[in-house]
Image (spheres, rainbow, N blue to C red):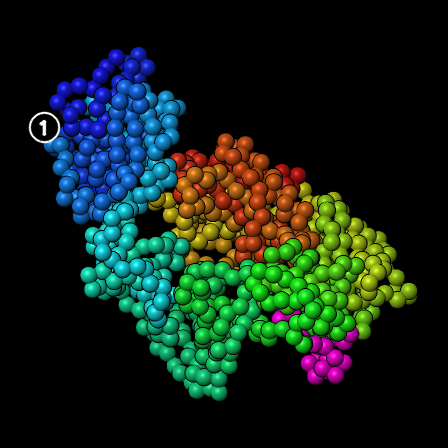
Amino acid sequence: MKKIAGVVCTALLAMGLHTAPALAADVTVTLPSFPVTLNGVTIEQSQNQYPMLVYKDITYVPMTWADTRLLGLDSSWTQQTGLVIDKAAEVPDQKTAQSSYKPYKAGAANAKKYTATIASGKITVNGKSINNSKEEYPLLLFRDVTYFPLTWRFAVTEFDWNYNFDAKNGLVIAPKPTVSVGSSNVSTKGEIIGQKVTVTGSGVNLRSDAGTGSSAVGTAQKGETLIVTGTKTVDGKTWYQVMRPSGDSNLWIASWYTKKIEESANASNNSTSSNSSSSGNSVSTSTGNSTSNTTSSNSMIGKTIAVTGSVVNLRANTNTTSAVLGQAVKGDTFTVLSEKTVDGDTWYQVKMKSGVKVWIAGWLTAESKGTTGSSNTGTSTNTSSTSGTSSSMAGKKIMVHATGVNLRTDAGTNHTIAGTVNKGVIFTVLAQKTVDGKVWYQVKYGNKNVWIASWLTEPYTESSNSSTGSVTAERTRLQLQSVKQQGDKTIVTLLKGAGNSYSTTKATANQLVLQLNNVYLNTADSINQSYNGPLQHLQVQDAGENALKVTMDLEKNAYCTVKEDGDNLVITAYSRGTGLHGKVIVLDPGHGGSDPGAIGRVLGVTDAEVGLSVGLKLRDLLEDAGATVLMTRETDVRLGLPERSDLANEAEADLFISIHANSSTNTVPQGIQIYYYAPSGNANLYAQSYVRKTLAENVSENMQEVTGTVSDVRTANYAVLRENDRPSILVETGFLSNAEEEALLAQDSYRQKLAEGIFEGVADYFD
């Protein structure tokens, strides 16, 4: 047995660690070619007796007394316990750690390459036993000192350090002090919160906390835009907590190196013109080939609005490409602080619970009118934790006054969606219930009793109907307008009446079933016909409760879109066909340009970079097989979300595939994830539920087989899937937040495997 001995042992916490030469393996290590900064100290390498080492592209730190104290660690060794490394109970602030740091100097300059040994013996980290022989990045012995790997798993997951790597600053690690440096708490109040600022200095440090004593975790360049999420005052100076539009958050920057971006100002210094209008001041801003018309108004200021969309993004500015600062769910209410109309779309400024001011799309909200009808009676209560029923509106008619209103299996936004109705649909209230202070109505939907939010309805009478121009309460006569065969698609047009609700109730490999409400079918209009093409047979039957059942038998693996067009419902059946030759496929590399998406913490690999690289490789494979490929982007440029799905919709593409790299605040998650979206509450998307899920499963299975990385299928409400009429999936190729997986995603050979896995999945889908 080899024992650590000599004068060095008295200075090292790793002293006395035993290793077995028969079991130990020699490995080649190098000195870092990049800067390494630990708790604000840039480690000197050339004359350091215990320099930092690099093994398998991971940086290693020596477990000397000085280095462990600098990193806020406690380390000890005994014959019984072996080597024990724990996070210290009290981590000193950066200034204290720096003042006590005294490195060990070597008598001669270090070489660039050395041999180290894999450590053996009992090792415990934060109370967890480490089997070093099975670690991908094992602890090492060099110059009789134990070296510890600075992987994301240990540095962040175990020790909760701030951890960053970039080309300019190299590796920067800063423990979070448990001893306060005297700064005030983070404030989320004030006009600057939620606003954009531009960086005025060059290479300005972004820090882990407010104050120049905090560690630098990156830099911001002149002209870069940041969003302020908090403020803090240190030594009389104001610091901004900021996030990047890409989503990187909890960064701190000195306020004096920034300048607020006025929303009405043109950032590129182009000319602006102002015209007076009755609704406020209208500003038309032109930048290059893009034109945006902004109009201010105060018609809704001070009023309460309720969210009508299922999950709605709260954004930093008045457009769908600005950074998402939070989300709201259906039924959430806000007070309008400000109102703007941009290119015909209305946006409301509201305040989140945290105090941050954000913007919400007006078309995803409706003015909240509170309870409709008389006050609650009987067992109804308005307390936040209880619910009760009341008959105050029972037997009365209501009309939906918003578009895309969800019907639920019980009162409350946390219950399952049972269907979706549009503006103008009329119901008779069966019962009334109050949940968390909000009134819900029970109504009949087809043959089911469901619940609808009262604030998305209004009382209905025959006289009020004529003034609003809404549909009448009488049922509409369903008529088959036309059935057209165009190439590989069949288009069915049904007259169902505007505002009458409909839903998809079944979608399989060869059948689509719809339910149409508030309609009837005359005997003379009987529909029971056969066709050639993707639509094989069409039949309409009575479903009871003023509803009709539309059954479409399809050729195997055909799929449909279901779209409302005024009084008509247009159902288009598409043949999937076989083979890749002639197929039109849209590939969508995520993010791009000023929006890098997620960024790896070790190598700095970006979501945008992975998506584009894999997308271009996949394009070549598909084109070689005879497919026509449309790319949403082929260079490092930024696109809005609508542009991506619009390309597929306009081209009537056979497939849409969005390609990304994943990230998580937790460094443990890893693996490939394939997402599709086909909720039962959306008639159009649910009509494709079978083919979307099949596509996702085919791609997932093949990617796992080709790459050897675990892959699973999930569903999520992503805009590029939600707004897409074409069979579509979103591929998350791996987690950049996981250091090991980021290293894989950085390799061109692995990206080629990812592309091949997707290609094989697409080929299986068409076969």
- Taking the image as shown, residue 515 lies to the left or right of residue 187, namely right
| Residue bearing mark 1 | 108
Residue 696, position as x, y percentages in the image: 59, 43
Crowd around label 1: few <14 · some 14–19 · many ≥20 (10 Å): few
- Taking the image as shown, residue 91 lies to the left or right of residue 680, namely left
Residue 84, position as x, y percentages in the image: 30, 28
Kindly identify the residue that appears in the image at 29 percent across and 25 percent down: 83
> For residue 386, what is the image quadrant?
bottom right
The disc labelled 1 sits on which kind of residue?
Ala
Q: In the current view of this chain or complex, which residue is farthest to the right?
A: 523
Residue sitting nearer the eye, 162 or 59: 162
Q: For the N terminus, which image quadrant?
A: top left
> For residue 265, what is the image quadrant?
bottom left
Kindly identify the residue that appears in the image at 65 percent across and 75 percent down: 375
Kindly identify the residue that appears in the image at 67 percent across and 76 percent down: 373
Residue 126, position as x, y percentages in the image: 34, 33
Q: For the C terminus, which image quadrant?
A: top right
Q: Which residues are magenta?
A: 454-473
- Taking the image as shown, residue 528 lies to the left or right of residue 220, namely right
Whether residue 204 is visible to the viewer of this picture, yes or no, is: no
472 drawn magenta: yes
